[in-house]
């Protein structure tokens, strides 16, 4: 049941991105251009999504959903340097390309050189993010908690085959 629900949610998400214009970098950059020719139409996407999420969260917070995923009872509001740095880098990437990670994945359905470059850049950024330890953690401790080690690669896979 979980895979079917995940698939249906993914189709719903991608359909919404396509219909709203969020797959178009020019549309997103127009929305982010507050001091130029600002295009406020994507504000409607947020204004529609936030109340729907708020209702769902209010109904299920702190309990598992029908599909087994726990809906958090409360948000973590801890602000630290890692969050500020990550948010700043995310905003810079989004503002420079006009592509958010969700639409980047969705755009792979009709790949172009730009789409593939952005997607590969996102993957590289995710990989690099594992080099930045969480507050109070060393890189070795973070690797041990997430099962990410330099040895967990093709070398280990070849030895087990």
Image (cartoon, rainbow, N blue to C red):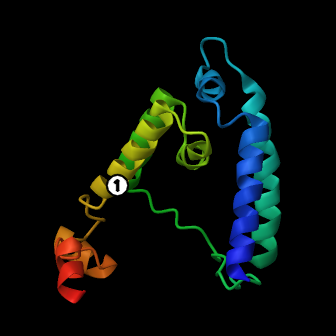
Residue 35 in percent (x, y) is at 59, 14
Q: How many marks?
A: 1
Is 23 drawn above or below residue 148 in the view shown?
above
Is 105 drawn above or below residue 143 in the view shown?
above
Residue 38 in percent (x, y) is at 67, 18
Q: Judge the density around disc 1: few (<14), some (14-19), many (≥20) Cα neighbours within 10 Å.
A: few
Residue 40 in percent (x, y) is at 74, 26
Relative to the observer, which residue lies in front, 148 or 48?
Answer: 148
Q: Quadrant of the N terminus?
A: bottom right
Residue drawn at (63%, 75%), measured in percent from left and top? Answer: 72
Viewer can see residue 88: no
Relative to the observer, which residue lies in front, 115 or 131?
Answer: 115
Residue 146 in percent (x, y) is at 33, 77
Q: Quadrant of the C terminus?
A: bottom left
Q: Is residue 66 found left or right of 27 in the rendered image?
A: right
Q: Is residue 5 found left or right of 91 in the rendered image?
A: right
Under circle 1, the secondary element is helix
Q: Quadrant of residue 119?
A: top left
Q: Is residue 134 found left or right of 51 in the rendered image?
A: left
Residue drawn at (45%, 32%), measured in percent from left and top? Answer: 113
Q: Which residue in the structure is indicated by mark 1?
A: 82
Q: Quadrant of residue 131?
A: bottom left
Residue drawn at (59%, 25%), measured in percent from left and top? Answer: 29
Is 51 drawn above or below residue 145 in the view shown?
above
Viewer can see residue 104: yes
Most extreme residue toward the top, as rendered? Answer: 36
Q: Quadrant of residue 55?
A: bottom right
């Amino acid at each position: 049941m979980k895979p079917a629900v995940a698939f249906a949610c993914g189709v719903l998400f991608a359909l919404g991105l396509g219909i709203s214009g969020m797959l178009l970098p020019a549309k997103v950059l127009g929305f982010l251009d507050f001091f130029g020719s600002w295009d406020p139409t994507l504000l409607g996407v947020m204004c529609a999504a936030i109340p729907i999420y708020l209702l769902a969260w209010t109904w299920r917070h702190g309990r598992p959903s029908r599909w087994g995923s726990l809906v958090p009872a409360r948000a973590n509001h801890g602000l630290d340097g890692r969050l500020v740095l990550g948010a700043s880098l995310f905003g810079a990437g989004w503002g420079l390309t006009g592509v958010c990670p969700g639409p980047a994945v969705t755009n792979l359905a009709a790949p172009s050189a730009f789409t593939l470059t952005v997607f590969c850049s996102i993957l590289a950024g995710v990989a690099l993010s594992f080099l930045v330890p969480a507050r109070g953690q060393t890189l070795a401790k973070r690797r041990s908690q997430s099962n990410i080690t330099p040895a967990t690669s093709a070398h280990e896979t070849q030895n087990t085959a």
